[in-house]
Amino acid sequence: MYVAVKGGEAAIDNAHRLLAEIRRGDPAVPDLTVAQIREQMRLLVDRVMTEGSLYDPDLAALALKQARGDVVEAVFLVRAYRTTLPRFGATEALDTGAMTLARRISATFKDLPGGQVLGPTFDYTHRLVDFALAAGAVPGPAAEAEPEADAAACPRVTDLLGQAGLLEPSPPDDGAPVGDLTREPVDYPADRAVRLQGLARGDEGFILALGYSTQRGYGRNHPFVGEIRVGTVELDFTPEELGFPVSLGTVDMTECQMINQFHGHGAVPPQFTRGYGLVFGQGERKAMAMALVDRSLRAAELGEAVVVPAQDQEFVLAHCDSLQATGFVEHMKLPHYVDFQAELDLVRRLRAEHAARTAEPDEPTLREAAE
Amino acid sequence: MPSASQTPPEPGMPDPAARRLAMAQAGQASPAELRAALAQAGITPEAEDLRPAETGLVMVRGRIGGDGRPFNAGEATVTRAAVRLPGGETGFAYHLGRDRDRARLAAILDAHWQRPEARPALDSALAAIAARRAEAARQAARKAAATRVNFFTLARGED
């Protein structure tokens, strides 16, 4: 029999007070400011913005502080915050070709207009722990050089290759409404725009592992990094009451253009196919993994067999969101007393039946013996 | 929420591109810079709220492949303000982030900017702010330029 119970309010209140104290850590160590997190844990802030699907560095930094550095918990806070706000509309589509570049590399073309600009990168570092940082070392000033004449206008690599017809063009803007998975549930098969929205906010670890699986042979699509660009882009928005676009300011973004194995059929001569990644902040790993998975999810469109997880839209999109995943996994730690009691009851009954069944063959003998 | 009225097209209105530029420059300014710009033009930052400053969201649109069909890349916080001056000029601001004070100051600036007598002083203050931003951008471009790879070909044996 189940008896409804209530309780735990005081325990919950005290648990949250304890959390606040533990979050603060040793009071002898100075309190971490939101500005410090924003400035010095920037890649973490960028990840929370990308997976929280909300560009606001201060908010993401505060969420990280509140979440004690737990990325998924911080994503939860950011997503919860966004639900409290009205949406004013959608920006004009941003132009990554006009990005002010902090970094721009291509693994396919050595010499390209604008050049290979390494920017602030971990690439080519020796991955030796720098104990000088623990000792509070102040870095020297960054080197400076006069930008070359072609640095002002850096065309996307895909624009250069596209001109020669070697690369499939981007799907044209037909003015059709843009699907939004925060407004309508995803219908499968989902169109590429909705898939990209899902991948952009998907968990970096999950998308990375899926991208990696395609490289290891589970849906191989032979990728090259056409280009990665990191920098700032201006966002324009047209308010209804003004009727002309105003600049909202600039956002940091990372774009990855993946160039993949070529295809040709009937009327279309062989040309490289593409995968695309775009994330908030500096998030190269995520943008690259997103581009790999974007390409593998195009399997059906490109006439490839859909046989592996990274090619399966529903598998990828229904499981890539860290908040949805954690919600379902973590809800299991909440009280399930009723469910479990029902199961327990059932198991006891089945065991009794089982015991009765296994005892039966002996029963006549026992009875006989008793008689 | 009272909806802001459509800005009426008035005769003698300035070039919309010039107003857009002024609004964009104001959007890059800090609240302190906006206060200083208004003070420089002899303006006290007071106006009637046409719509109280409020924070909301915009959906940021990207394009597939960088230049193709649009898709929703994620949202961003935006704060907007709308004010009206006693003379009837209405000013607007839409900025990334959650700073209501800044948006309201920028809306007041936008409203005053539409008064021809206030415009030159505001334009020069905004130009000074923009010049500071441009200098910071130039500095960043110089640092990025120092990380540009200069390839050279190694000379080979015989020739």
Image (cartoon, grey):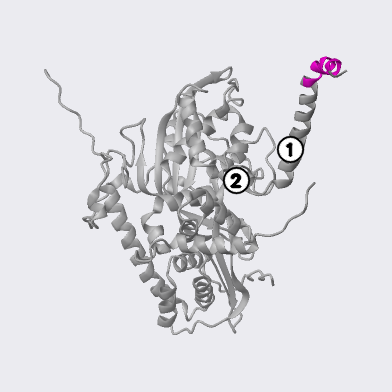
Is disc 2 on the same chain as disc 1? yes
Q: Amino acid at mark 2?
A: Glu
Q: Residues within 10 Å of mark 2 (few under 14, many from 20)?
A: few
Q: Quadrant of residue A371?
A: top right
Instruction: Find residue A349 and report its horizontal and vertical position in percent.
Output: 79, 33
Q: Amino acid at mark 1?
A: Glu
For the magenta stretch, what is the residue range? A359-369
Tell me, yes or no, whether the highlighted magenta stretch contains residue A365.
yes
Q: Secondary structure at mark 2?
A: helix
The residue furthest left is: B158
Foreground pick, A351 / A111: A351
Residue shown at the point (34%, 39%) measured from the top left: A113
> Which chain letter matches label 2?
A
Disc 1 versus disc 2: nearer the observer: 1
> Which chain letter matches label 1?
A
Instruction: Find residue A203 and report its horizontal and vertical position in percent.
Output: 52, 42
Left-right relation of A353 to A77: right
Residue located beneath label 1 in the image: A343
Q: Are marks 1 and 2 in contact (CB under 8 Å)?
A: no
Q: Earlier in the sequence, mark 1 or mark 2?
A: 2
Residue located beneath label 2 in the image: A330
